[in-house]
Image (spheres, rainbow, N blue to C red):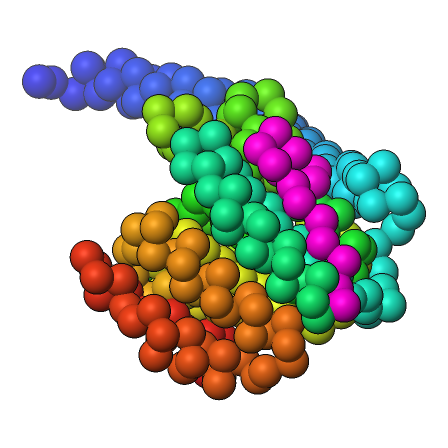
Amino acid sequence: MNAEDEPDLQTGAEQGQENIDRVLNSSLPNLPGREEKRQRLAARRSRTKRRKIKTAIILIILIVASTTTIQTVWAWSQCGGPLAPKDSPVPTKGIALIDELQWQHPNPEFVQTVRAAAAQAGYSFDYYPPNTATVDFFASLPRQAYAMIIFRTHGSADLVPDRTSPSIATNEPYTQYNHLNDQLLDRVTALNVNRTRVFAITPSYITSDMCGRFPGTLILAMWCTGGQWTSLADAFIQKGARAYIGWNGPVTVTHTDQAFARLVGLLAQGDGVDSSIRNTMAQTGPDPFTGAELTHYPA
């Protein structure tokens, strides 16, 4: 390279720098605009997020309000007025026999024995044959103010307490479209009885859906393992019942009829729960096939 070429090299370097400066100068004025645009976009996203949160809160409020409205309407339609959980009806000297087993296991002698025991003790007697024990029928039981309710029914045992809940069978055929609110809240369930799928009420149905309170009613559960677990018994006690009596294991129909015929007579005469059970077991003994014995709650 000679001296004559230096001016050309310097001129080229200067032109390159000028080009760089021109590019930088053309870019720098846009930076504030881009930052402002980014901030506007972030603000818009924040407003959209807040709107979504508000919408979700409104939907939750509407759902809660709708559920409350449904429960209020249910109370008026099924209970003849708003639920009053602290109010108890005036107790009457009445005995009710809910006999869902009449179809498969009729026992007119048992019915007559209970009727006679009620009459002898000065009690009225109401007999409910199959087809009367619907879900809504159970809802109105507390307001009947019975002194004693005998469930000659089917039931399910709480054999796996952490998975299932015990229940009392009704005679109402199960469909997925009836009692939707109670199905969603697990207050009613389905139970297979003699190859027929029927509705069954759970402990939460007793505490939440039954109208009013029991006036110190004695609850007699004649089905298998009716007294093995305490969740059903506790639900009735919470609802005002005085005591709950059932079997601590599987039991045959013949033996449960024999034992409860004796038990009802003793209770109707005014004997205490504990002594009535002891006397009944002394006379009839445990179930000869299963060994099941009567138990009561509270113990």
Residue 38 highlighted magenta (yes or no): no
Residue 208 falls in image quadrant: bottom right
Task: Tell me if 85 is positioned left or right of 229 in this view.
Answer: right
Residue 158 picture location, percent across and down: 36, 55
Above or below 206: residue 130: above
Residue that appears at 41% across and 24% down? 196
| Residue in front for this viewpoint, 45 or 248 | 248
Figure disc tally? 0
| Residue in front for this viewpoint, 231 or 154 | 154
Span shown in magenta = 122-137
Residue 118 picture location, percent across and down: 68, 62
Residue 199 in sight here: no
Task: Tell me if 222 is positioned left or right of 138 in this view.
Answer: left
Residue 127 highlighted magenta (yes or no): yes
Residue 273 picture location, percent across and down: 54, 80
Residue 184 picture location, percent across and down: 57, 37
| Residue in front for this viewpoint, 64 or 155 | 155
Residue that appears at 24% across and 18% down? 9
Residue 178 falls in image quadrant: top right
Above or below 116: residue 156: above
